Amino acid sequence: MQFYKERILNAAQLKRLSEHKYSCTSASILDAWLQPWWCWLVSKTPLWLAPNLITILGLIVNIVTTLILIWYSPDARQEPPRWACALCALGVFVYQSLDAIDGKQARRTGSQSPLGELFDHGCDSISTVFIALGACIAVKLGDYPTWMFFQCFCAMTLFYCAHWQAYVTGTLKMGRIDVTEAQYAIILIHLISAILGPDFWTTQVGSLEMRYSLGGVAVAGAVLTLGALGAAIAAGGVGKNGSTVAGTSILSPVIPFSLVVVPAFIIFQKSESHVYENHPALYILAFGMVAAKVTNRLVVAHMTKSEMELYDWSLLGPAMLFLNQYFNNAIPEYYVLWLCTLWVYADLMRYCGQICFEICEHLRIRLFRIPYPPHAPHLPHAPHLPHVPHADPKPERNGTSDSEKSESEDSAPLLNNNSIS
């Protein structure tokens, strides 16, 4: 495991990535209902706006609104302002809507590329952490730290398992109740907290509090996702002798993610200063970015049909906390937790930036720009030159998102879009 590689992807991996075709099936209930809204929204989007820029803008809105909620309730036990919950609901809605139209914008501008799929899933892996954490704060789940740990890491695990299944079968499969339904459920949670107050979730219904319903939803989601993954593993992969798309063992992805979840739980349980209970938001944000990094590496392994490395330098962050506990907390755990957080965020940004740069360079595309309009520009008449058909240079493609949650979206019309011929 080399600390710094001049090139993360070799020539063979880049070639396989350029040949990658996005495959997704969806039976989502809400996707069909939301198609008119998404089509109307993309029809109002300027043609010069790059799809990846749409995705990253939505992610920024989601992160900022969640950080405001964290600012007012870093331990998830304090009652956040109702307006902060409403703002967080808006942030999730904006992210979900923009994430849904980036692929439509890519097709609309003719700027699809494999980088778009990777960029979309990379942003989703980060937003999963912030969305799950924001929902826990909105219902003051910090009163039950173990339960909050389960809720947040369950969300990260389910997202990872969805891509594990794609690594095995070659197709990302969405169920009847999947990511779109989960996002809108969380929007509803924030709106209830904004209207009735976060204390509403402490209301007793019989012998149980209202927020116990969140645990039931998480368990149901886990059963559905893990059941689908188990069925895919039992059926065997699409590779040789039932292996993954890369020809590796279908069980191999369990090791990298276990190296995130298991240390997170052990450090939480063994902490003498109760670092997780006192600072749950910071703790989850730290380990959540490690999970996001590992998930990104799984997506890259799938798209490049490569073996996934078991170890990663982002694990050095959790190792800091583990070793500090081993040496009887030579440094206060809170400071080590901050150091861990800074390390994993820096490592994640370095990895994502380098991956995007290498793919852009290989595909000769730009990440956040569409350098040419979707239609060929009108050339001035030059009578003294003979007409040469197809003499225009091939427009440079933009690295944009072609990831959609439903195959049926490809045939959905763009409503009121007169700018597309």
Image (cartoon, helix red, strand yellow):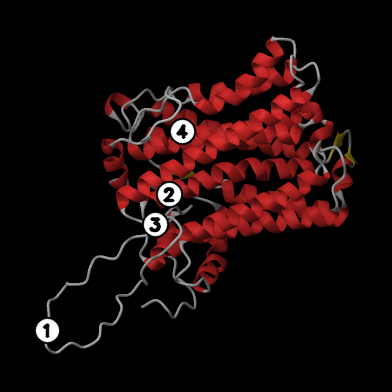
Residue 279 locus on image (x, y percent): 78, 31
Q: CB under 8 Å between callouts 2 and 1?
A: no
Depth check, front residue: 407 or 277: 277
Residue 218 locus on image (x, y percent): 67, 36
Q: Which mark is residue 385?
A: 1
The residue where tag 3 is placed is 366
SS class, disc 2:
helix
The residue where tag 2 is placed is 117
Gap between marks 2 and 3, in whole Å? Answer: 14 Å
Residue type pointed to by label 4: Trp
Q: Quadrant of the N terminus?
A: top left
- What's the residue at 81%, 43% (across, down)? 139
SS class, disc 3:
loop
Gap between marks 4 and 2, in whole Å? Answer: 16 Å
SS class, disc 4:
helix
Depth check, front residue: 209 or 264: 264
Residue 131 locus on image (x, y percent): 66, 45
Would you say residue 55 is visible in this rendering?
yes
Which comes before the other along the chain, label 2 or label 1? Answer: 2
Gap between marks 2 and 1, in whole Å? Answer: 43 Å
Gap between marks 4 and 3, in whole Å? Answer: 29 Å
Gap between marks 1 and 4, in whole Å? Answer: 57 Å
Which comes before the other along the chain, label 1 or label 4? Answer: 4
The residue where tag 4 is placed is 164
Residue type pointed to by label 2: Glu
Q: CB under 8 Å between callouts 1 and 4?
A: no
Residue 392 locus on image (x, y percent): 21, 72
Q: Residues within 10 Å of mark 2 (few under 14, many from 20)?
A: many
Q: Residues within 10 Å of mark 1 (few under 14, many from 20)?
A: few
- Please state which of the two labelled residues, at mark 1 or mark 4, is closer to the viewer: 1
Residue type pointed to by label 3: Arg
